[in-house]
Amino acid sequence: MANIVPKNIMEDLVEWKLNELLRSAAMCCCERCRADVKALALNKLPPRYVVSVSGDVYSHFDAMNVQTQVNITAAIAAAIRIVRESPHHSEQYA
């Protein structure tokens, strides 16, 4: 039987937008800084759970909803400012 699991697709939406926004951000993009930005942004956004079977999403979510995209962009931009001002990695990654 297929593995049916709930999935927070907000994580995927944030990851997709994060890649776009980090290209133009003047900040460290090491793995730790990326993870910090993503975690801060996700903590400011509501989760959007869908049911998936073995990784394939079987529920439709309007990911391109304008307000959702604005909220994601704003949360990531705020997280970028925070991490850029106070990165939590050692100087070897800077």
Image (cartoon, rainbow, N blue to C red):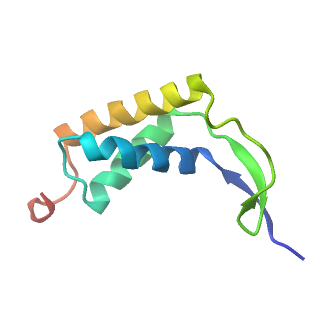
Q: Residue 29 in the image: state x and y as whole percent.
A: 25, 54
* Nearer the observer, 14 or 63: 63
- List the single residue furthest toward the right: 1
Residue 68 % position (x, y): 58, 28
Q: On the image, which quarter does residue 90 sit in? A: bottom left
Q: Quadrant of the N terminus?
A: bottom right
Q: Is 86 placed left or right of 32 in the picture? A: left
Q: Is residue 15 left or right of residue 79?
A: right
Image quarter of residue 13: top right
Residue shown at 63% from the left, 48% from the top: 9
Residue at 49% of width from left, 38% of height from top?
A: 43
Quarter of the image with the C terminus is: bottom left
For the view shown, which residue lies furthest in the bottom direction?
A: 1
Residue that appears at 43% across and 47% down = 39
Q: Quadrant of residue 37?
A: top left
The residue lying at 63 percent from left, 37 percent from top is: 63
Q: Nearer the viewer, residue 6 or 16?
A: 16
Q: Is residue 9 left or right of residue 93?
A: right
**Horizontal and vertical percent for residue 34?**
33, 53
Choose between 54 and 62: the one closer to the eye: 62
Q: Where does residue 72 sit, x and y in percent of width and height?
A: 49, 33
Vertical arrangement, residue 89 with respect to residue 13, above or below: below
